[in-house]
Every structure is written in C-alpha cells, then in structure tokens.
Image: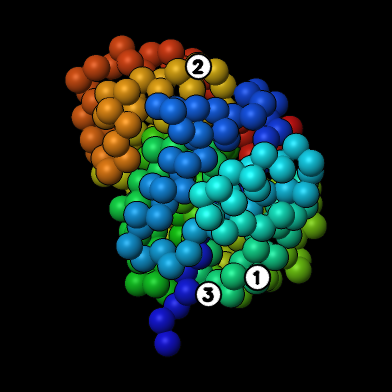
Amino acid sequence: MPLNVVAIIQARMGSTRLPGKVLKEIQGKPMLWYVVERTKKAKIVNQVIVATTTDPSDDLITSFCKTQEYPYYRGSVQDVLDRFYQAAKMYTADVIVRITSDCPLIDPGLIDLTVDALLEHDVDFTTNRLPPPFSRTYPIGLDVEVCTFAVLEKAWREASSSHEREHVMPYLYEKEGRFKVWQMNSPVDYGRLRWTVDTPADLEVIRKIFVYFSGRIDFTWLDVLELYKQEPGLFQYNEEIRQKSLYDK
C-alpha cells in the first residue's frame, strides 16, 4: 500500500519582525499562496495542509484557505509540535513534510529528494538543513524536514522543553543517536544566502525575485541561484540580517 506523504505548512499571522507576513502580497497574491502552490508541485507529496492556530487573528488564514480550497487544521499557538501531530493524525499521514510559511521559494524538487532520502536510507528523519547553531549548505528559505508518523508521535509523547514543542522537530535530531538522521547537503555551500521572509528587507528581496520571473512559480532554486550570480544587487538588501537561532525567543 503506498505511503501517504503529507506536507504540513505551519502558518500564523503573529510574527515579531514582520506581523502578518504570511498574507503579505507578492505579485498580487499572498505569500502563503506561493508556499502552498510550490509545495503542491512536489511529485511525491499526496496532500498539502496548512496548520494554523486557534487564535482569532488567524481567522484570516483560514478564510484564505477556504477561498482556495486548501485543507487546513487549527491547533495550539505555542505547542506547534502538538499542532503538527494532530494535523498529521487528522489527515492520516504516514510521512510528514514540515514546511514553514515564510519560504515562498520552497523547491518541490528538494522536497522530493528529502522524502526520497528518508525512504532510501531507511531513517527516521531527513532534512536539507539544521537550524542554528547547527549546519546548513542550502540557502535559508529552502528548508525541508521529513519524518515518519511513528517518530513524530514519539516526539509528541516525549518532548518536554519549550523549544522542542515550539520548533516541532528538535527532539528528533538534537541528541545524537536517539533517532536515525540523514542530512542532505549541497555540493557547494550556499548556506549564507537568505531567501526567507522574516523582515521587510527580506520581503523586498523576494518581491524582486518574483518580478524577475514575472510571477511564475515553476522556476527552481537553481534558477534563483543563477539570478543571484547574474544580479547580486537584487539580493543585497537583507544580507546583514541574522537568522534567529533555534533557542532565540
């Protein structure tokens, strides 16, 4: 029986550095639209779910999901691990792909590769980056984390610290040997490049990228990398922004 691979995109209106960022417009469409539609292009993913919160401010997100006919789940504001677990359980996921809603350049090909790595190497958790203070070689904003439902449920039952609950997956990779972990790396280290949206400067860069591609969503991360090499000035606005650590509040 084929595995049910479910991508869960966490989204909320609250953001310390850029409130309401998930619905900020890029080429006339909310940022969340780009995240969902690009994730849906992953060949191995069966369902794409938006996991938001029960906070009234997130009524805007569920209203948007209804207009687009996107499946969604509403859960805890702070306990994001519980939100993911309950969403995965509701949609009967065998494999969970975690995507965050501040990544409008998320690459469906990288999603497929990360899920394939989980199955090929028979591990519990695969990723193409680990957040600070760990390592990454792919640009910030292409972040994919994948695990089986069984290990997500184990984390849900056992994880106790606030950052383990808030950031969903740390329980799976922080302690060496607890689970079988596989990290994918780019042949060239591009980990310093910032293609996420956490500040107004980030949003300005992303908007310029989508202007260049005329609103298309079928380009790959390698196309963006080629743009970076040809037009580095487009990317200069957010170069000095520090990516928050896993342990930052």
Q: Position of residue 150 (x, y in %)?
A: 61, 75
What secondary structure is marked by label 2? helix
Relative to the observer, which residue lies in front, 56 or 165? 56
- Eyeballing the image, is 125 above or below 32? below
**Residue that label 3 marks:** 94
- Label 2 Cα crowd, 10 Å radius (few <14 / some 14-19 / many 20+): some
Amino acid type, residue under disc 2 in the picture? Ala
Amino acid type, residue under disc 1 in the picture? Met
Quadrant (top left/top right/bottom left/bottom right) for the C terminus: top right
In the drawing, does residue 207 fall left or right of residue 167? left
Cα distance, mark 3 to mark 2?
38 Å
Whether residue 141 is visible here, answered yes or no, is: no
The quarter of the picture where residue 49 lies is: bottom right
- Eyeballing the image, is 189 above or below 82? above
Q: Nearer the viewer, mark 1 or mark 3?
A: 1
- Eyeballing the image, is 152 above or below 41? below
